[in-house]
Every structure is written in C-alpha cells, then in structure tokens.
Amino acid sequence: MKLTRPLLTVLIAATALAGCDGARPEGPRQRWQQQRAELQRAVADDPSAVRPRVELARAQLRLGDGVGAEASVKAALAAGANADYLRPLLARAYALQDEGIRALQTLDEGPIAPEMIGEAAWVAGDVHLGNGDIDAARDAYDRAVRERPRDSRLWVDVARFRDANADTLGARDAIDYAIELDPANSAALAYKANLVRTQAGLTASLTWYDKALAADPDDADALIDQAATLGDLGRYREMLVALRHAAALVPRDPRPYYLQAVLAARAGNYALARSLLQRTRGELDDQPGFMLLSAIVELELGGEAVAASWADRLLAEQPHNFTARRILAAADWADGDADGAAEALAPIADRPDADSWSLLLAARTASELGHRGEAADYLARAAALAPGDATPFATDDSFGLLASGADADPLNPAKAIPAISADMASGNFASAIARATRLRDANRGVADAHILLGDAALAGERYDLAIQSFRAARDLDAGERTTLRLANALFRAGDAAGSGAAILTLRDSQPQSIAADRLAGHLAMDIEHWDQAIVHFERVRSRIGNRDVAILRDLARAYAAKGQGDLALPLISAAYRLQPLNAEIMLFYADLLQKQGDRQAAADLRYKAEQIGR
C-alpha cells in the first residue's frame, strides 16, 4: 500500500520518539549481555581475580563497549595479568572508541603473546582500513588470516577490506567462506546481503537480511541496512519497524536518524528532516550522503547560505558531483549571487551532455551578468532537449607527461586512468583500449576495471568488446552505472531488444532508479503501450516533481495518445512554462488547445513557433 505524505510523516515522528519494541526472541546479543552481567558479579565478589576480568573484557568487546572493555583490561593488568596477552584486547578497546592511533601505539609498546598475534594483526588491519591505508591493512589482514585461518568473524572484516578495495569477487569469496565456517554468523549474513544488493538488486538482498536477523534478531547493523533497503523499495512501514528496533538497541547511533531524515525529505516534510539530521550530533557530517541531504533540506527551507555551505563541502571532496553543483548554483542564485551560480554551473554547462535545467539556469545567470550571447546559446541548447554525448573528464597535465607516467607504471590506476582519458580525448582509442585491457586483466574482480575498458571500447566503436566488458561489470555490480552502459552499447550495436531487456532488468532490480523508469517509459512509447509508459513517467514525476521538461512532454504525449487530452493539457502547459522557446512543445501544446476548442490560443502558439524557427 502506498502511504500518503501526512501518514508517512506521522509514522516517522512516532519512530523518532519510540522507545523499545517489547519482548524479542533471545539472540547472541542477549546471551553476551547475560554473560557480561554474570562476570561483573564475579569480579565484584573477587576484586583480585584475573580470568573473570579478561573474560569480561571479551564480552564487552563483543557488545561494542570499548570504554567498559578498556576499564576491564586495565583492572586485569592491575591485578597481575600478562600484558603481552592483553595488549591486543586493549588495542581493540581503543579502536572501538575511534582512537586508532592509540590502538596502534598500544600494539607497539611491547611484545605480543604468540597466541594473540593474530588478534593483534586483526586489530591493526581494522585501524589501517579505517584510516584508508590500504597497503598496511592488506599486510595486517594477511598476517591475521595466517594466524587465525578459520575465524569466521575475521573473514567478515577481510571481506570488508576487499570490498573497500573494489575487489568484488574477493569480497564475495571471503564472505562465503565466513558463512561456511559459521552459518549463524549474523555479521557475515548481513554483509552477504549488502554484496547481493549490489550484485543482484534490492529485492534479492532481503532474503539475506532475513537470515542475518534470524541468526541474531538484535544485530543493529543488519537492521539499519535492511531498513535502508526497504526504504529504497518504498516499503516504508517495514523500514520504520526495523529502524525502531535498531534505535532501541543503539539509541546513540546516528544512522537511524539519518534514514528517517531521508524518508521525511521524500515525504516533503523538510522541517522534520532538518530536526532529524540535527539529532545525529554531527557524527555523520563528513559523509557525502549526509552533506547532500543537508544541502537539499536547507535549500527547501530557504536557508540558501547554509545549503551552499553544505554543497561546497561536498564538492571539495567530489568535484565531479553534478547534483551538488546544481544545488550550489540554485542556492547562490536564490541568494542573489549570479557570479557564484555561474561558477558552480560552468563545469556542467560547458559539457555537450548538459541537462536542460542546468542550461536554463546558466542562461539566467549569463543574462544577469550581461553576457547575452552566452545566454542565447544556453537557451538554444536547453530548448533542443537533445544533449550530446558525454566526454571524458579533462586532465590538467600534458598528454606526453600522462603517457610516460602510465607507461612506467601501467597497473597503477592513478597513472593509467588519466592517460586513458587523454587517449580518448585525442582520438587514440587503440592506445586507450590497450591500457584499459592491462588494468582489467590485473583486476578482473573489480567492476570499475571492466567499465573503464568498456568505455574505451565504446568510444572506439569496438561494440563487441564494449558489450563483453559491460556484461562482466554488471555481473559484479548490477546498478545503474553498469546496466545503462550495457544498454547503450547494445543499442548502438543494433540490438534494440537486448538494450530494452537490460533496462527492464534494472527497473525490476532497482525500483528506485529514475533512469530505468525514464528509459522504460520510452520503450513503452515506442511500442505504443501508453498505460505502461504513463506508469513509468508518473513514477519519475512523483520523485522529481514538475521540473523536467522532457518527462512532462512525454507524459503529455502518452495521455494524449490514450485520448485523455484533459490530463495531457496541464502537463504540456507546465512544460511550456519551463521552456517557452521550444518550438516542438509549442506546436504540441497548440494541437491540444485546438482539440479543446481554444483556436485563438492555438493559433498564437503556432505563430510564435514559426517566428522562433526563422
């Protein structure tokens, strides 16, 4: 059942205020909590006991209580415990408190007991991964695996490492082995769900989330990830139930508040979204998704300066994030800063594949700044509603310098990718394909490596190679970035049916994909399935509103083809208000007005279209 926005808002507010969910089946977390309570009583009865304090520290670590574990380890040391044995446990306690440097220092303070070397390497791997030091993390995890080859929980972290390193196949192998070692490992099952979500889509992942929560009903990470997936599927009631349970388990975790803020923003309640974002207490401020949502919320609430600040922060990390650029431009324009808006839009508007919304705003800023020629050019491009092909991102270095660097170190992506981009920009497609092939061969488990080769092959009109590469990429990641590339390559190779099948597969596996719905609508229009086209286009319109001229035009066409001119007319009217100089829209609008009996208005529009065409 589709929820109305008011009801959705009430449910979000209720979840934000919720306490506990009542009785739940006993799971691993509750058993660890019971063990912790028993050990706390034991150490209270015998303050000099060492073993109960060590076991208490281990129970606290399993429950994520870094502060408690630190106190227990230090108490055990004060009672005479072996420091060589406890050093890795103390380091783990520091790591849980986000004190990575202190954790590594603790490991370096003295020798490690032989039976704890694997634990120490494991902690070091986690800290290095958190710091982004991939090479150090790899060495540490390799040592940990040698020492603890059958530790299921360790293999989950190895999977996380491989996934962070874009080694999708390696991550799958690691997580499958973790599940083989311990089929009841909820963390392994939940991470398997995350990998399946990327590989096969949202719906396919739900089975694995269910398995994870059957193994441990109180796995907060699994509940939060499941909630995010349910939200993307539009199953908001179930999402909020999962979030309520997670919030009861980890009341200070900011992620449930963030997900509820996303839902509130989708429902159009931006004031509630802002309130929920503030309840994260700044703990997610450095996350790109949080920055983007904050910028959107503040812009909708009239806080242009704050919205611009969030967008600026995101662009500092992701300069090619065009959504952030559009938000920054809109915020600057609304705040009266035409220069800032023009600067934000320039990297988009200068591309041949610029969208019409960006071009229209670029025209307004150019006109405001007195650049009438630029404004006219932007308006003409926007009115065409026919963007060109995407181009590779520009590189700052000379071609020779890029080529020599890549030749010297051909398997280093930081050197090879700019050289491939430069090759493509200069039309040297054979060289680009050769470089991309070497990278692909060395990284067959990495979707990006296959995408890079596919992009180079497609630019060089090697369609068979492009299709092969994009299919390999889609086997690793079934999202938009791979499937849309595959659909485009198939279409350009003359396989329209295969292209359509790829788009419909994406629509089924990723129901939240605006691009999939848009393209599926066009496929339905091509075969005159007007009802299906309307469903797809209306789904897009419900997500983005009445600001996309092409969607409004195509939806109007579908309704008109069904003979529902009364529904088509307000849509094409809205498109005309957005693009008053588009002759095609004017003529279609005139035809609808004529059919509705408004002959004079239709004649006026046809005359205007004729004048523009001269």
Image: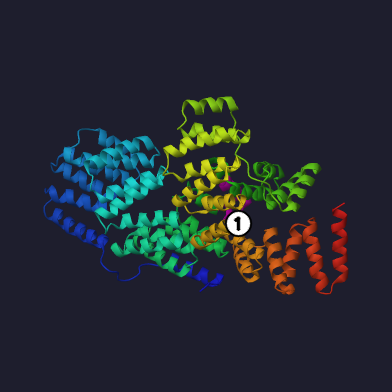
Question: Going 77% across and 49% down the picture, which residue do you hit?
Answer: 380
Q: Is residue 10 magenta?
A: no
Question: Going 65% across and 41% down the picture, which residue do you hit?
Answer: 347
- Secondary structure predominantly adopted by residues drawn in magenta: helix
Residue 586 visible somewhere in the drawing: yes
Q: Give whichever of 423, 290 is nearer the camera.
A: 423
Q: Give whichever of 409, 543 is nearer the camera.
A: 409
Image height check: is 331 above or below 143?
below
Q: Give whichever of 9, 390 is nearer the camera.
A: 390
Instruction: Pinpoint residue 352: horizontal percent, then vertical percent.
Output: 68, 44
In the visual, does 82 lie left or right of 205? left
Instruction: Pinpoint residue 115: horizontal percent, then vertical percent.
Output: 17, 41
Q: Is residue 302 magenta?
A: yes
Q: Could you classify mark 1 by the number of other residues whose Cα lies within 10 Å: few (under 14), some (14-19), or many (20 or more)?
A: some
Would you identify the image quadrant in which residue 341 lies? top right
Instruction: Pinpoint residue 405: horizontal percent, then vertical percent.
Output: 51, 26
Looking at the picture, which amino acid does disc 1 mark? Ala
Question: Going 28% across and 45% down the picture, which residue do you hit?
Answer: 93
In the visual, does 561 lie left or right of 135? right
In the visual, does 266 lie left or right of 75? right
Element at label 1: helix
Question: In this figure, which residue is indicated by the disc labeled 1?
Answer: 496
Residue 64 visible somewhere in the drawing: no
Question: Going 61% across and 60% down the picture, which residue do you hit?
Answer: 518
In the visual, does 590 lie left or right of 354? right
Image height check: is 75 above or below 215?
above
The stretch of residues the image draws in magenta is 294-311
